[in-house]
Amino acid sequence: MGWLGGAIGYALGSRFGALGGIIGAVLGSGIADLLGSKAKEAEVWRQMKNEAHERMRARATSRHGTPQEREVVFLTAVGAMLAKLSKADGHVDATEIEAGERAFVRLGLTPQNRELCIRAFRAAKTDSHSIFEYAESFASVARAVAIREMMYDILWDVACADGTVSVEERSILELIVTPLRIRPSIFVEQRSRRMRTSQTSQSAVDPYSVIGCSASATNEEVRRAYRAQAKKHHPDLLRAQGLPEEMIARANEQMARINAAWDEIKRARGIG
């Protein structure tokens, strides 16, 4: 378990809302072997939870947790959101599980972090919290807008995995922009893009949609849109916010797509 075992002492608590309980379920399995009898195990476990709860309350007024703390919350929230969205239409489809696996690959997770996400996925399928609570926890540690928008894109991937976005999934995708703290217009943009993708080849990527503007925008508007996207995905900015290196690598991939789209637009418009 490595650092996961060490994290259990403080990861449970109230600072991250719904994640307090699920992190215990995700990380707690490696602790049992260190405890004595079943009776002693229950008592020690209660003490650990209470102590961790108080430590986390004391930290709640601070925007800064340890990098380890943020990573645990970040990865657990990812797994929990994927589970809740997959189950939104009443059951978890095999194609949705495959989409979740692709999300782990897309995020570049290490085997250890992938295992944490999978545990969170399993635990969240049957808990009583909503996806919106997990989205709030995710946003509390993923302070870079680019990362929150990337997670939203991944949620769309899962919703579209079985070929149909259900009414329940569509409602979640429309409402979750608020707890994720991203612009409401991104829902319409994603819906339109997904509809186009289902009707045309995925190789025909619209460069304007990549940088977040319309084809009718002026050269200056296009330039501003490009600069805004480039700033959001700058690796130094993301690293300063303590995000996992996997996510920074994923943001760099997105930055490469943004640059490619900008180059295509410049060629088409003759922009120097």
Image (spheres, rainbow, N blue to C red):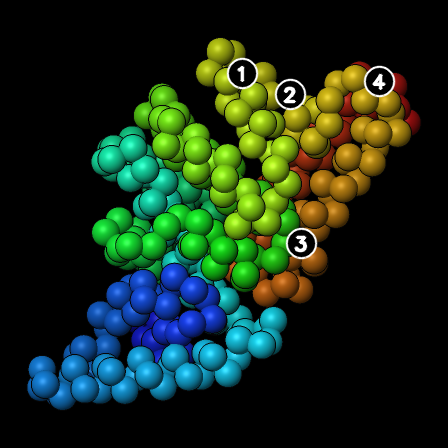
Horizontal arrangement in the rendering, residue 198 relative to residue 211 (left or right): left
Within-10-Å neighbours for mark 3: few <14, some 14–19, many 20+: many
Q: Secondary structure at mark 1?
A: helix
N-terminal label among 2 and 4: 2
Q: Which residue is mark 2?
A: 206
Q: Examine the image and state in which quarter residue 211 appears.
A: top right
Residue 245 picture location, percent across and down: 54, 58
Residue 17 picture location, percent across and down: 43, 64
Closer to us: 253 or 133: 133
Closer to us: 99 or 89: 89
* Amino acid on which the number 3 mark rests in the picture: Pro
* Amino acid on which the number 4 mark rests in the picture: Arg
* Amino acid on which the number 1 mark rests in the picture: Arg
N-terminal label among 4 and 1: 1
Q: Quadrant of the N terminus?
A: bottom left
Q: Quote the CA–CA distance across marks 2 and 3.
A: 24 Å
* Amino acid on which the number 2 mark rests in the picture: Asp
The tally of labels here is 4
N-terminal label among 3 and 1: 1
Q: Quote the CA–CA distance across marks 3 and 1.
A: 30 Å
Q: Which residue is mark 4?
A: 269
Name the residue located 59 percent from the left edge and 49 percent from the top edge: 181
Instruction: Please state which of the two labelled residues, at mark 3 or mark 1, is closer to the viewer.
Output: 1
Residue 14 visible in the shown view: yes
Q: Which residue is mark 3?
A: 235
Residue 103 picture location, percent across and down: 41, 42
Name the residue located 38 percent from the left edge and 63 percent from the top edge: 19
What is the number of the mark on residue 196? 1
Q: Quote the CA–CA distance across marks 4 and 1.
A: 23 Å
Mark 3 and mark 1 in contact? Answer it, CB < 8 Å.
Answer: no
N-terminal label among 2 and 1: 1
Q: Quote the CA–CA distance across marks 2 and 1.
A: 10 Å
